[in-house]
Image: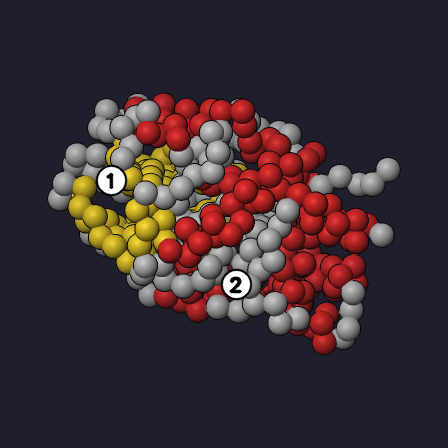
Amino acid sequence: MAKAFASQADLDAKKITFERISENAYAYTAEGDPNSGVIIGDDSVMVIDTTATPAMAQDLIARIRSVTDLPIKYVVLTHYHAVRVLGASAYFKEGGEQVIASRGTYEMIVERGEADMKSEIERFPRLFAGVETVPGLTWPTLVFEKEMTLFMGKLEVKIAHLGAGHTKGDTVVWLPGQKVLFSGDLVEYDAACYCGDAQLEPWPATLDALAALQPEALVPGRGPALRGRAQVEQGIAYTKDFVSTLLRAGREAVAARMGLKEAMAHTRQLMDPKFGQVFIYEHCLPFDVTRAYDEASGIAHPRIWTAERDKEMWAALQA
């Protein structure tokens, strides 16, 4: 019998934490599961990444309601992966008016949204509890090119695309007055970086642009909220090390004319000692190695993952 995806056996619920990290910012984290962020302004609330289903979003909404009754007016998609965005419809019942995304994220929805949704749901069923409540793809109502600024009352909120990395459309949300940054999956800490749709070569430079903001608190896409300049720098350095090591392994495998299964073994030699025990490492690594191998082979734009391609890749690695 063929071995199943590691993610299909990941059935244990994670401890959720909802913590205040500045006067207006909150982090919703779950031991390596996808994080969300919350900004409570003077007149409204912004949610950054929505959880995977409207049913799962109810827990985050309840936690928001425990601290404010202001309307949830904005939803920001830091990038397009189903596990981050398919819960968005839950917030419109709360008065949500705008779903904000970068141009690159919008283009990803057009190009691969349907395939991504089917692929992710089949890969990681625990993260899609209540999947029957998903009405379909999440589409932005407001698309920006490079940067936009909102004022939630007097609170200034900047939303920006600083460069490609985790995807081509990665978006950060920045509170300049409080030095708080929501990075999406551009930064992941104490967890594997999922790189199946990544732009690995420019990712470190994008992290440098993020670090140049000099955040004093950072909510990563996965892992605990990072507080203080030292922790923030550690989280950024961790992510840079992960993606740089991965791409180096891919380049070495291609240069040595290895096949994908050999490339996996070579990558493990470099990465297992440093990252083998972090959250979702075994789930991410097949997709990460495949993408690094592709990028090192000259495939600059990530190929679309479908449920069928998932199975083909997995079979090749198990052969």
Residue 176 point in image, percent of width and height: 23, 54
Helix, strand or loop at mark 2: loop
Report the residue marked by disc 1.
24
Residue 202: percent from left, percent from top: 48, 68
Q: How many marks?
A: 2
Quadrant assignment, res 114:
top right
Instruction: Decide: is 33 above or below 274.
Output: above
Q: Residue 66, percent across and down?
A: 30, 23
- Residue type highlighted by circle 1: Asn
Q: Amino acid at mark 2?
A: Gln
Q: Is residue 193 left or right of residue 277?
A: left
Tell me where residue 103 sits by quadrant. bottom left
- In this view, the residue in front, 282 or 71, is 71
Q: Earlier in the sequence, mark 1 or mark 2?
A: 1
In the image, which disc is placed on residue 199? 2
Q: Is residue 112 above or below residue 242?
A: above
State the residue in front, 150 or 283.
150
Quarter of the picture holding the N terminus: top right
Give the residue drawn at x 31%, y 60%: 146
Kindly tell me whether residue 124 is visible in this rendering.
no
* Badge 1 density bin: few <14, some 14–19, many ≥20, Cα 10 Å: some
